[in-house]
Amino acid sequence: MSYKCSRCKRDVQLDEYGGVRCPYCGHRVLLKERSRDVKEVGVQ
Amino acid sequence: MTEEYDVEFVEREDREARFLVRGVTPAFANGIRRAMIADVPTMAIDTVRFVENSSVMFDEQLALRLGLVPLTTPPVGEFVEDDTVTLSIDVEGPATAYSGNLVSSDSLVQPADENVPIIDLKDGQRLEAEAEVVLDRGKNHAKHQGGVAVGYRHLQRVEVVGDVPEFEEPDERIVRGVIEDDGELVPTSEFDHDLTNRYPDQEVAIEDVPNAFVFHVETDGSFTVEELVTRAAETIEARATELEEAVQL
Amino acid sequence: MMVPVRCFTCGTVVGEHWEEFDERANEGEEDPKEVLDELGVERYCCRRMLVSHTDLVDVVSPYQ
């Protein structure tokens, strides 16, 4: 799953040991990217 | 019912009308009203496939907005329940996505209103989606409700019974709907709903005309008022036939 | 956020009138009552949909 750092806007790949942290700027807020598949939603 | 039906239009436009029906029972008038609201099938978006949505609203919110856009409903027999039509929308910001941006796969099914804003897209945002349109009834979801603000009132007969005593301050007499004065139909909006404007210094008596109802019908644009009323009557007929067959078995 | 497409109470489509209403009554100086009358938004259920609405898209868009 790919994330994006909310400060430096770079793509971040999370690994098991690194913890939640941007490897480029050290920022701890990461945003999850929207998946690329088509999403089907019903009108309710 | 032994009496003959008699229908007379008071106001008539494409999407809004007022008409008088004579010779129907209150129960039947209400049956027609309810059929117009809940039983006439209309086309509406049912599922949406989002290819891209980077707008500020969630997919589910946009799906509901798309679903509520009224679509023109094709003539009876062109479609049956379970048939589908596909609409697609592709708008890139900075722009506003309107219901008019929906492109239909079938010319019979088009957005009835083109200027409904779906979502405001900022620079770099994009909305790309495909929507599946189905035919269904107002009973199941309000988006399929073709008749909007459908109602009826008794026709009221107004008769002049005398004069107001000279030094008495006349009270206002508020009436809404349509009145019958000497066989002439007058919508109350013509005299600001106040009988003292129409009959100054006169004493009037109002009574409901039995079995005469003035319907007020508006549609959401799916079809014309005439179409809505006739289709409502057809659904009542279909249900009556169904009952008849069920009883005979 | 965005204007509701239909009136919550009666189901009339009100969204199509929003932009003109906003321009004339909110941004402009016209009397909202007159604008609504001209747009043909008659009932008070539909009128409140437009009168009480605030567009929030510009407010939330920086937080994407």
Image (tube, helix red, strand yellow):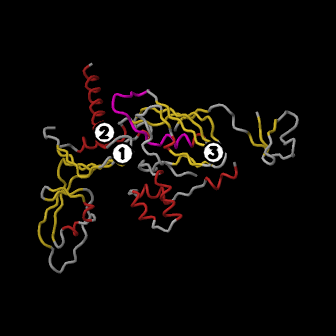
Is B80 one of the magenta-colored residues? Answer: yes
Rendered residue at 66%/51% (across/down): C61
Would residue B236 be counted in the magenta stretch? no
What percent of the width, then of the height, locates residue B224? 33, 42
Q: Chain of mark 2?
A: B
- What numbered label is drawn on residue A12? none
Q: Could you give the CA–CA distance between mark 3 and mark 2, rounded to whole angstroms?
A: 38 Å
> Does B96 sit left or right of B123 as displayed?
left
CA neighbours of label 2 inside 10 A, class few (<14), some (14 to 19), many (20+): some
Q: Position of residue C16 (x, y in %)?
A: 47, 51
Q: Quadrant of the C terminus of chain B?
A: top left
Q: Are marks 3 and 2 in contact (CB under 8 Å)?
A: no
Considering the numbered disc 1 on the image, is that residue within a helix, a strand or a loop? strand
Mark 3 closeness class: few <14, some 14–19, many ≥20 residues within 10 Å: many
For residue B226, above or below residue B167: above
Q: Find residue B219 and name its label.
A: 1
Q: Residue B214 placed where, x, y %?
A: 24, 50
Which amino acid type is marked by label 2? Glu
Chain under label 3?
B
Residue C55 relative to residue B172: left or right: right
Magenta stretch: give its range: B62-82
Q: What residue is pinned by disc 3?
A: B55
Above-or-below relation of B20 to B235: below
Q: Are marks 1 and 2 on the same chain?
A: yes
